[in-house]
Amino acid sequence: MRTKGKPTKRRIAGLAKSPSGIAGLDEITFGGLPTGRPTLICGSAGCGKTLLAMEFLIHGVLAQNEPGVFVAFEESADDLTKNVASLGYDLNDLCARKKLVIDHIHAERSEIEEAGEYDLEGLFVRLGYAIDSIGAKRVVLDTIEAIFAALPNAFVVRAELRRLFRWLKDKGVTAVVTAERGDGTLTRQGLEEYVSDCVILLDHRTKEQISTRRMRIIKYRGSAHGNNEYPFLIDDQGISVLPITSLGLQHKATPERVSSGIASLDLMLGGKGYYRGASILVSGTGGTGKSSLAAHFVQAACRRGERCLYFASEESPAQIMRNMSAIGVDLAAGVKKGLLRLNAIRPYSYGLEMHLLTVHKLISEFRPSVVIIDPITNYISLGDHLEVKSMLTRLIDFLKEQSITALFTSLTQGGSALEQSEVSISSLMDTWVMMRAIENNGERNRGLQILKARGIGHSNRTREFLITDEGIELVDVYVGPDGVITGSARLAQRAIGEAAAVVHRQEMQLQLRDLERKREVMEAQMMSLRAKVAAQEKNSNTQRPRASRREEFKPKQSAKLYNEKH
Amino acid sequence: MKNTKAARATMKSPQAMPKPYVLRLYVAGQTPKSILALANLKKICEEHMHNDYSIEVIDLLERPQLASGDQILAIPTLVRTLPHPIKKIIGDLSNTERVLIGLDLRPQG
């Protein structure tokens, strides 16, 4: 197999792979380790070689029903069993069910005298016996280089190991061989020369007192594989690798909108709020209400029955809940219902990649539809500009891929330009809400502006942002000759307006009253006139006969006159 | 060596006394090295142990489960189980000097 030369495309497709069961590793190897071939895992002490090999084996037993043999050269079976018990695996049980054999090969150099030629057939016999006793498909040799220390003749050992790997291939078992990293070489004894089908390098680096584990596939004969260095995490669930590459810009876009949790902010965003799956940046100087805005968004999402994941790096979950309840935002209800998970961790606990990994892992577990990172700027101090930007790009790609609406708060340093978001993350964001402190008349008020909202016809106005006991309110600011007027000045302005209205109303009433009086006067005059007329009529009725005659004649005369004229 | 049991029987001392030297020779099939090792061992025992020994030949191809007991890696391996401490000598035992040192039959150096 080793001499078959460059594999053709059909062979790549045909290369069988054994899933390792390690989150992420199977993705970067496109399916797992090569079935029936040995894989070399090298790395310095304490970088997780044994754990990776053990997980590979246990996963084979539990998920693939492939029994496994673990040949330990350094640890006893007891120690191994105890070590993986913390991950929730019971090796004794697996051994009892004949799914696993742990063979501790121990050779003490001081006990051994060399007298003539020998080979390592004893190792082959043991291994063959262990494999055949349970029909093993997977074999781990951890750490085989210990043999070099135990046996005096390195040439023999070398030749025998070469034979061993060939023999393992002939047996058709998928083998994982671990080896210590050497000085300038991948392994101390140059095992990579023999095991050349798949070589994985584990690394454990410390930069500025923060250590990060990384993994790289150096070669994988007959298969494509991820080329980068991938950070990985060892926690209570074992190893998880995240293929954190930029996922590209392939994500779907939905026209669905989600409320920001603040009706007046929704109005500013075309009446409907943010797009689902959008990345929202809320930037501002300290104390402008970024977290409160985020909390409203979370509360709204919880009320819709959506799951939220809140990454806080400045306050503990209890503190966030207390502080938000003070402004009428009830986050505890969401937590109680299991819809909200608050994850508080100081940024300096991990390196940048590890944070990204943790975020990935939690998101994959919790499957939220809203993610809050408060504040994102805390992570920026963990790496240089390029690293941070690359991390954020990958994070945003990942979130968009999952259609997760993400809200990032960003702390703008006082003194720098307000619109300067750190590491120019704003270009990665779809919606940018800027909070700013407006200082005048000896007071500091909060203002809110939407700097951009991709795909949303948004308001261009600055609103004053009020944090009340019932939550956030946005109020129109007054724009006066000295700029925007906020706070008590705005209240004063409003009072002036109200006073003017009162005056106006009073004037109106005065006018009305004046009119009324005039009308009364007129009516009184009319009354007296009518009374006069009535009195005159009374008088004239008494002389009626004469007057009536005269009156009867008069219309006839006028009619005549009229007829003559026309 | 054609029949391990027979070989063991012939190698045992006829005397019933407890043997100061209890030796086990691990082999894996009848390879030239194994045959040579057994021949060398017999010779050394005859010359240096004056019948105060017993030799057990274990063929791991027949009884592979025995390999782990004495932590056998190399073949052939001679294990001196008695007297204590346990000593292991690997190889075809052609270097008599080293075998004798390994068995504490000769002061080192």
Image (cartoon, grey):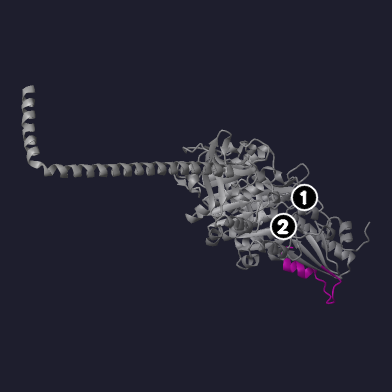
Nearer the observer, A104 or A121: A104
Whether labels 2 and 1 belong to a single chain: the reply is: yes
Q: Quadrant of the C terminus of chain A?
A: top left
Name the mark on residue A156: 1
Quadrant of the rendered image containing residue A519: top left
Res B63 visible: no
The amino acid type, in three-letter code, at marker 1 is Val
Q: Secondary structure at mark 1?
A: helix
Residue projecting furthest to the bottom: B16
Please tell me whether residue A407 belongs to the stretch shown in magenta. Answer: no
Q: Which residues are magenta?
A: B1-22
Chain label for disc 2: A
Q: Residue at x 47, y 42 (%)?
A: A503
Q: Residue at x 26, y 44 (%)?
A: A528
Question: Which percent across, then down, holds residue A176?
Answer: 66, 52
Nearer the observer, A317 or B68: A317
Quadrant of the rendered image containing residue A11: top right
Give the residue pinned by disc 2: A123
Question: Which percent across, then down, holds residue B29?
Answer: 71, 59
Please tell me whether residue B5 belongs to the stretch shown in magenta. Answer: yes
Label 2 CA crowd tier, 10 Å (few <14, some 14–19, many 20+): many
Question: Which percent across, then down, holds residue A284?
Answer: 61, 42
Chain label for disc 1: A
Label 1 CA crowd tier, 10 Å (few <14, some 14–19, many 20+): some
Earlier in the chain: of badge 2 and badge 1, it is: 2
Question: Which percent across, then down, holds residue B59?
Answer: 72, 63
Tell me the distance, in whole angstroms, between the alpha carbons under discs 2 and 1: 13 Å
Nearer the observer, A2 or A392: A392
Residue projecting furthest to the top: A565
